[in-house]
Image (cartoon, rainbow, N blue to C red):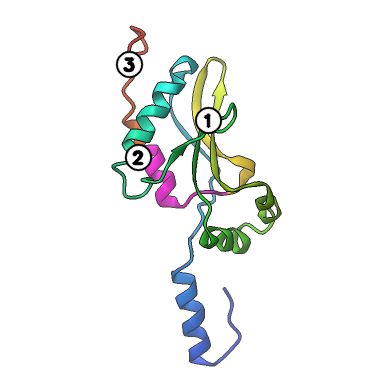
Amino acid sequence: MMISYKNNNIIFIIKYNMLNTILLDKDTYIYFNPFLKIYKNEVIKQIINSSKKSMILNKLKNVYSFNHVFSLDLTNEWLNAIKNQNPLKYHLLKYHFEREFNFFEYGDEIIGLYTLNGMRWWTIQEKNEFIRLFKLINLDQKNGKT
């Protein structure tokens, strides 16, 4: 952010506000080890259970919808961060009440997770925590057991 003022108080306030602002990650997709679509509900269950032990995604919820899989709260702090860091998508917030994440597929497999409408719904820490949780998934796809 460029500051043209010489007043140290104004610079301090701007720096303080920037430090306390959520910093959105630029990625809107993550990829993980693919799994068969028939395991979707089991994977969701494992991710939700694992997220309860996480300091970062402990408020992760399952969305019971055909398209949406997971959601996180959309707080005023998030609204402000999106308005400032993703202004081209900010107008879409009137259609959202939470941050939504969807699976994406290739053939009969689910290969990743993406943020709805390219909203940049996650921080770097949240994105990395999703990746970590997906690495913990335990599926025995060869024998049809979970």
Query: What residue is pinned by disc 1?
Result: 64
Q: Secondary structure at mark 3?
A: loop
Taking the spot 49% from the left edge, 91% from the top edge, the residue there is 8
Instruction: Say which quadrant the C terminus sits in.
Output: top left
Q: Quadrant of residue 114?
A: top right
For the residues marked 2 and 3, what is the alpha-carbon distance in whole angstroms?
A: 18 Å
Considering only vertical position in the picture, is 92 above or below 87? Answer: above
Query: What residue is pinned by disc 2?
Result: 51
For the residues marked 2 and 1, what is the alpha-carbon distance in whole angstroms?
A: 17 Å
Per the rendered image, the range of residues in magenta is 120-132
Q: Amino acid at mark 3?
A: Thr
For the residues marked 3 and 1, what is the alpha-carbon distance in whole angstroms?
A: 21 Å
Give percent across and percent down for residue 81.
55, 61
**40 or 4: nearer the viewer:** 40
Q: From the viewer's perspective, tell me whether residue 68 is left or right of residue 45.
A: right
Classify mark 3: residues with Cα within 10 Å, few (<14), some (14-19) or many (20+).
few
Q: Within the magenta stretch, is there residue 87?
A: no
Considering only vertical position in the picture, is 115 above or below 79? Answer: above
Q: Residue furthest top?
A: 143
